[in-house]
Amino acid sequence: MSPADVPALLTAGLLEGGAHALRLGAPEALPWLQGQERVTFARVGVVDPRDPDDYVDHGGMRGLGRALAMEPSDVVAEVTASGLRGRGGAAFPSGIKLRTVLDTPADQKYVVCNADEGDSGSFADRMLMEGDPFLLIEGMAIAGWAAGANDGFVYIRSEYPDAIATMRSAIAAAETRGWLTGPGATGGVLGSDFVFRVHLRVGAGAYICGEETALMESIEGRRGVVRAKPPLPAIQGLWGKPTVINNVLSLAALPSVLAHGAGFYAALGHERSRGTQVVQLAGNVARGGIVEVPFGVTVRQIVEQWGGGTASGRPVRTVQVGGPLGAYLPPEQFDLPLDYEAFNAAGALLGHGSIVVFDDTVDMAGMARFAMEFCAAESCGKCTPCRIGSTRGVELIDKIAAGVEREKNIDVLLDLCEVMADASLCAMGGFTPLPVRSALRHFTDDFHRTATDATDLTDPNGATV
Ligand SMILES: Cc1cc2nc3c(=O)[nH]c(=O)nc-3n(C[C@H](O)[C@H](O)[C@H](O)COP(=O)(O)O)c2cc1C
Ligand code: SF4
């Protein structure tokens, strides 16, 4: 809706429940919102996000209260038993990360919340911060207690002004309430001795600043360039200190794990992917938005049952799952369950859980080109396969589309993908081959469409291209 719709809605009796074409009704009355398992998003859309009392009235702060009554090591054991894995893309077990930081001796440790959310089609971090910011603050405090960290940083991209404003006001309210230690204060969290401060940092919006080591470079005031690993951030992270760095949704899952117990969380899910996945539906889809479901639900269910197919009404040709570095799935793969291992086995990536839908008018050679172009634009430049390979990839796809020595150039492109996948320093260059290879494998015809077989094309210097 737009602001211009508001007077008509009010005239129609919006506040009294009056009928209007734009008034869809209560969420319980909408069939396509049913069948979800809202754990992380249980309060979003229900509470006033800036009101700490509303948060407590809806079950907030119970997880932190229970955690502070436990030994840090027991909190880590609870998180490990829940089966929680990182939601930022790599699906690394959260308990192991906490354990590593807890067991690494240091005078200072940090918790960093990765709220850079650069993936195309992703918006769950933003919605969580705008809709339930205290949940993230509570999750960060639990992580701080478990790992022995007294300072936390939330790193948010500058394109998220509402999330930044909401987080700022929530941090201030939490400090006033004694849920966090305020600037200059020495008091502990919830009346305990545990001092925990949360600071907010705004990034300029480079995709690579979502990569954990580049993000820490950025917080430290340098250009976002990837650091070689090891050492892992859990051993030497922010300012060289042991650091728990987690995605917004990983940290926001901790209060539920602690409040309801590891068993509650571990009971949801599929195989080694436990708990819920917050799926973000975008692109050419009839009903875009967030759907929170246990792992194990299939891509087809998400796209058809919740998404309602394409917005254009044309057949779905493909979906890209997991952001710009994710594979394109053809309809034959739509029965894949949301499960990290199942996706890996299919040469795909679940990533941060975004699903971008395309109808049958999409040109997949163009999408493969876009993947290489995106990598060329966003590469931090530190390693050759990514920095130079991506530009060569764009050129190769242009030649293939123009019909220049097509078969030979497809072979070179596949060879280039292998080099990028095997030799890139981080997943930026390492995963860019996923969308390219999947487009080539499943939509081969699109690379042969403009067959001019113009092997006699010449460049401006007269050499054969
Ligand atoms: C190019 C690139 C971009 C990334 N962007 C994000 C991001 O925006 N948000 C995020 O949480 N993780 C992102 N990651 C993953 C992080 O490096 C890291 O794995 C994550 O923050 C760890 O948190 P988790 O264990 O909770 O998933 C990115 C990784 C790469 C290689
Ligand atoms: S793969 Fe790309 S983004 Fe990652 S370190 Fe190498 S150049 Fe930088």
Image (tube, helix red, strand yellow):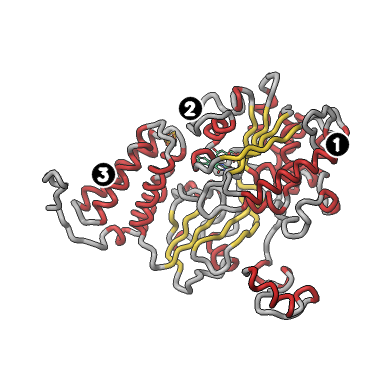
Q: Position of residue 98 (x, y in %)?
A: 67, 32
Q: Is residue 220 above or below residue 362?
A: above
Name which of mark 1 and mark 3 comes first in the sequence: 1
Q: Is residue 263 visible?
A: no
Q: Which residue is mark 1?
A: 190
Q: Nearer the viewer, mark 2 or mark 3?
A: 2
Q: Amino acid at mark 2?
A: Ala
- On screen, residue 153 above or below 39: above
Q: Residue at x 63, y 51 (%)?
A: 126
Q: Quadrant of residue 263?
A: top right
Q: Earlier in the sequence, mark 1 or mark 2?
A: 1
Q: Position of residue 95 (x, y in %)?
A: 67, 35
Asked if the residue at label 2 sits under 8 Å from ligand 2, the reply is no
Disc 1 element: helix
Marker disc for residue 412 = 3
Ligand 2 shown in quarter: top left
Quickly name the residue at label 2.
Answer: 228
Query: Along the line of sight, which residue is nearer the eye, 392 or 437?
Result: 392
| Quadrant placement of the N terminus | bottom right
Q: Residue at x 60, y 45 (%)?
A: 87
